[in-house]
Structure formats: C-alpha cells, structure tokens
Image (spheres, rainbow, N blue to C red):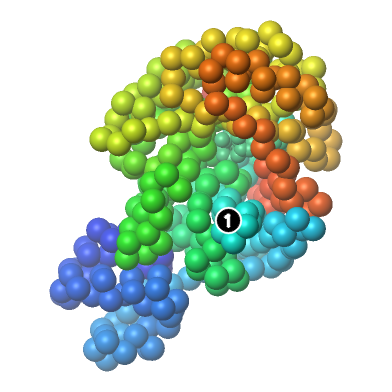
Amino acid sequence: MNKQNLLSLNQEALNDFFVCLGEKHYRTKQVMQWIYKVHEFDFDKMFNFSKPLREELNKIACIEFPKVVKQKFALDKVIKWVLALSKDNYIEMVYIPDKDRGTLCISSQVGCALACTFCSTGMQGFNKNLTTGEIIAQVLIANKYLNSKRISNVVFMGMGEPLLNEQAVYNACDLLLDDLAFGLSRRKVTISTSGIVPAILRMSKRTPVSLAISLHAPNNQLRDKLVPVNQKYSIEKLLKACKVYLNAGTQERHILFEYVMLENVNDSTEHANKLAKLLKTISAKVNLIPFNSFERTQYKSSNTQTIKQFQDILYQQGIRTMMRRTRGEDIDGACGQLAGRVLNKTKKPDARKY
Ligand code: SAH
Ligand code: SF4
C-alpha cells in the first residue's frame, strides 16, 4: 500500500484524514504545528500524539521529501537547488534574495508540454505533474537551508505550467496562505501562466493568489509562434479571462504581464505601442524580461537601450512597467534556464491538446 504523504494534504484534507482515523479535528492543528513550525518530520517524536496514533501514522502515512542532489551559489547570491523526485525526474528551484528577504521560484511540473520556443524547460518535453507534496517540499527544503523568515514571496515561475496541474497547485497555494503552514499573504504568492484560459476562470474562483501572464507578443500571429498555446487561446480570449480574474474576489487585484525581450522579434516601437493599446483597459503591470540564453537557442536578448525605449513607450501611455534584472545567470538559474532533467521524454509536447 502506498503511504499518504501528509505534505500533499491541505488543512481540509488533513481534517478528513484524521476523521477517517477516528481522531478529533485538533490533530490537524497539532500535525501542522509539527511539520510547518517545528520542522519535525518523525511521527515518533510528535510527543502529543498517543502511542497507538503514532504507530498508525507510521503504518499508513509519511512526510516525504525529494532528495537535494545539487546546490549552486551564484555570484549575486542567487541559490539554485536540483531536486530528484525519482531516479528519472529532476526539478530545479531558485531563491532570489533581495536585501534581507527574497523570492522562491518553484516548479510545478517535470518539464513542460507547451513548448514555448524561447524556453529551455519547454524544449525538453513533459514528463509528469508534481504532487502537492512535491511542491510544498520545495518550500520546506528552502526554508531549512535559509531561515524561514527569509522567504517573503513564492512564485510558480520555475519549471512547468502551473495551470496544467491545477489541483496540486491550488492545494499547495492553500498551504502557502494558511497561517498554520506558511502564512504568506495572497499578494506574495504568484501563479504565472502562459494563458490556459479555462483554468484562469477556475483559478479566479478557487484561490485568491496573484496572477502573472506570460504574454510576450502583442499580436496573435507572433504569439502563435512564441507561445504555441496561443493557437488555442488567442490574446482576445486571454484578456477576457484576465478581466474575469480582476473582477473576482472582494479585494482589489492586478495582473503582472511578463514580456521576454527578444532582439528583432518582439521589441520594436510598433510592438510597444500595440502592447500599450492592448493593456490600457486592464489593471496591469508589465515586467520586461531580458531573454536568458541557453544552449541551442536561436534567440538573442534585446539590448538595454532597446528595452529602455520599449519601457518608455509603455510608461508614457500610462502602463506601469519594470525591467527585470537578470539574476543567477552564472549558475543557469535565471528565468527560462531551468532545465532539470527529463529522461522519459515519451510525452512529446503538443500545445494544441489543451
Ligand atoms: N509556465 C509558466 C511559468 C514558468 S516560466 C509561464 O510560462 O508563465 C516563468 C517565466 O519565465 C515566464 O514568464 C516565461 O515566459 C519566462 N521565460 C521562459 N524562458 C525564458 C527565457 N529564456 N528568458 C527569459 N524568460 C523566460
Ligand atoms: Fe512551459 Fe512556461 Fe516554458 Fe512556456 S515558458 S514552455 S509554458 S515553462
């Protein structure tokens, strides 16, 4: 029998788990205290559990982590971890420090099926969805290496498309926001997506976390090439779903639009003007990302001056625009450089399926 990894259960699921064992609800709070506050993962050491309960937990449950196989430190203090989920599946996560706090960039899949042409993860195909436990374990592992207080933001911008692994990602978001677990505010947790429209509509109702959209092109003809899932969900459909997200929930929401700057591909003044026009009616912030290179890519990054001009055009038309500083480049830890390892590439990417 497969043991239940307790890291895969959000508070509600833990309640159900303990009720099935004939235990009271307060066991949920106790076990979450052990796991997320004390960082104790051995049932035998959870002294406020009765001996029969500890024995039962050892029989049917576990608290299991991927193995850390590599830890790399960049000159700018970015840290990258390579984690083994099994002997064939490796993922990567990155910590980007900023003064005394920082952002943890986590993975949601091994590889990615969406095959964006400028992305190293997308080039390698897809192998599997991560479980909630495998997602949450990344945050616990980073917490252990750093000091819990130092992770201020968690972003699903590592390997994979989080909105093609919805249930596991939403349950992980529950734990990231839960005061009994990580207690982050909804603004500090971000799901980044290349635009899976029906999932954005579901996410709007299911979780209040922040949304980032990987747009990368202001017209369908170009976006079809760069982000092939656009062939299924056009820019018009995507922006309509964005408006549903913005109007859902009781608190004010914004969307971060990511735009990778590719020399002579999507970086002209016409592109900037078209982008400004598209985003005018949306509560948007734009993040311009210099393209991060990897082996066998046909693209080059736009130069700083072009990016600055692009930024000015957006800015003059009232769009808040930032330029993302490239971090962790010397350890291949920058956006889009996370490769992990996908040995079983039988599941070839086909964006039109979704
Ligand atoms: N699949 C999701 C999240 C993971 S990718 C998504 O696409 O949004 C995280 C971000 O890195 C996305 O905005 C993606 O477009 C960007 N990215 C991918 N490859 C990149 C590269 N080579 N250089 C810069 N950014 C890249
Ligand atoms: Fe997948 Fe995102 Fe990379 Fe596109 S950019 S291939 S959606 S990980």
Residue shown at 70% from the left, 41% from the top? 325
Taking the image as shown, residue 226 lies to the left or right of residue 44, namely right
Q: Residues within 10 Å of mark 1 (few under 14, many from 20)?
A: some
Kindly indicate the quadrant of the structure image that contains residue 250: top left
Residue at image mark 1: 102
Q: Secondary structure at mark 1?
A: strand
Q: Position of residue 28 (x, y in %)?
A: 26, 70
Residue 257, above or below 142: above
Q: Is residue 156 above or below residue 352?
A: below
Relative to 261, is 303 on the left or the right?
A: right
Q: Nearer the viewer, residue 140 or 121?
A: 140
Q: Quadrant of the N terminus?
A: bottom left
Residue 116, position as x, y percentages in the image: 65, 30
The residue sitting at 40% across, 17% down in the picture is 240
Say which of 86 and 8 sits in front.
8
* Image point (40%, 62%), residue name: 182
Task: Note whether residue 81 is visible.
Answer: yes
Q: 292 or 187, which is in the foreground?
A: 187
Quadrant housing residue 206: top left
Inspect this view and state whether residue 8 appears.
no
Residue 20 position within the rendered picture, expressed as x and y whole percent measured from the top left: 19, 68
Q: Amino acid at mark 1?
A: Gly
Question: Which residue appears at 55% of the width and 26% of the height?
Answer: 320
Taking the image as shown, residue 242 lies to the left or right of residue 349, namely left
